[in-house]
Image (cartoon, grey):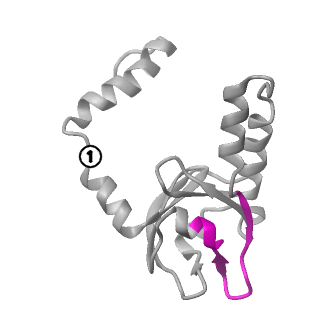
Amino acid sequence: MTKQLLGEFECKIDAKGRFMLPSGLKKQLGASDQERFVINRGFENNLTLYPESEWLKISREVNTLNLYNKKNREFVRYFFRGASELRLDSAGRLLLPKPLIEYGGIGREIVLFAYGQRIELWAKEAYEGMLASEPDDFSALAEEVMGKINQESGGDDA
């Protein structure tokens, strides 16, 4: 099982759409998660790379949705659209599918942003643009999002 992933890693994409999985990121993955991945479309025109074991967990969760509900069917179609298995080649590279490269607007440079059990893959310019649009009041956003967790758990403010 993969532990919590963490970090930002800049990578170069070669002419065939391959990139090296950074050793600092690979070291964070469990032995069984270092070679097989699934990649799909992210929520903000980025891509999301999952270790295969995490993808299987998420897929099981998504597959429990009631497909008689139209919104659920739409979500499932969009979520799985473009999902592709990736395996490290003998040189330690992953090959990105061309349709996903186009979806993410990916050029020669990418940023891998690892958190939790997933790795977001961003075109470098898009990632920098996303960071530049940080909310004016991050403190207020933190209170809005995280304050609810503390209230629901009945915990005291730290």
Give the residue furthest to the front.
70
Q: Position of residue 38 (x, y in %)?
A: 71, 60
Residue at image point 80% right, 36% down: 63
Q: Total marks drawn?
A: 1
138 and 43: which is toward the camera: 43
As helix, strand or loop, the secondary structure at mark 1 comes to loop
83 and 151: which is toward the camera: 83
Q: Magenta span covers which residues?
A: 83-100
Query: Relative to 66, does residue 117 appear above or below in the rendering?
Result: below
Q: Position of residue 20 (x, y in %)?
A: 58, 80
Residue at image point 79% right, 24% down: 66
129 and 111: which is toward the camera: 129
Which part of the image, by quadrant, shows the C terminus?
A: top left
Query: Relative to 130, does residue 126 appear above or below in the rendering?
Result: below
Q: Say if residue 27 shows up in the picture.
A: no
Q: Is residue 98 magenta?
A: yes
Q: Say if residue 13 shows up in the picture.
A: yes
Residue, disc 1: 134
Q: Which quarter of the picture shows residue 26?
A: bottom right
Query: Relative to 66, does residue 20 appear above or below in the rendering?
Result: below
Residue type, numbered disc 1: Glu
Q: Is residue 38 magenta?
A: no
Q: Position of residue 7 (x, y in %)?
A: 45, 60
Q: Which quarter of the picture shows residue 111?
A: bottom left
Q: Residues within 10 Å of mark 1 (few under 14, many from 20)?
A: few
Residue at image point 66% right, 27% down: 71
Give the residue furthest to the left.
136
* Horizontal side of residue 86 vs 118, given as left or right: right
Residue at image point 55% right, 51% down: 42
* Horizontal side of residue 43 vs 127, given as left or right: right
Q: Position of residue 9 (x, y in %)?
A: 45, 69
Query: Relative to 41, does residue 101 appear above or below in the rendering?
Result: below
